[in-house]
Amino acid sequence: MFEGLFQPMHLLIIAGIALLIFGPKKLPELGKGLGDGIRGFKAAISGEEKPNDTGKSEGAKKDS
């Protein structure tokens, strides 16, 4: 059913249409966002956690 779905000519046509719709300046941003999303999804599936970017460590307690 999906034997010839992603042939090189089809991928070129899809890339050309995306270029016409979004323009050359927006495509790298879309690609970066898509890559970040895929990386985050893979990390969530494998159970990896990212470190806190807020600068606060969870295990640190302040002595008063």
Image: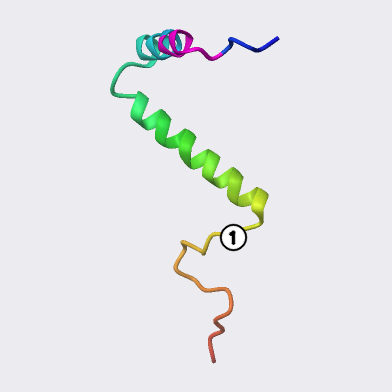
**Residue corresponding to mark 1:** 49
| Direction from residue 43 to residue 8 in the image, left or right | left
The residue depicted at 32 percent of the width and 16 percent of the height is 23
Q: Front-most of 2 and 14?
A: 2
Name the residue furthest left. Answer: 25
| Res 5 quadrant in image | top right
The residue depicted at 60 percent of the width and 46 percent of the height is 42
Secondary element type, mark 1: loop
Q: Front-most of 2 and 62?
A: 2
Local packing at callout 1 (Cα closer than 10 Å; few below 14, some 14-19, many 20+) is few
**Can you give x and y, in whole percent of width and height, for residue 21 in the image?**
39, 11
Viewport quadrant of the C terminus: bottom right
Magenta region, mostly helix, strand or loop?
A: helix
**Can you give x and y, in whole percent of width and height, for residue 47 in the image?**
66, 56
| Direction from residue 32 to residue 25 in the image, left or right | left
Amino acid type of disc 1? Glu
Magenta range: 6-12
**Can you give x and y, in whole percent of width and height, for residue 51 in the image?**
52, 64
| Res 59 quadrant in image | bottom right
Name the residue furthest right. Answer: 1
**Can you give x and y, in whole percent of width and height, for residue 18 in the image?**
41, 14
Viewport quadrant of the N terminus: top right
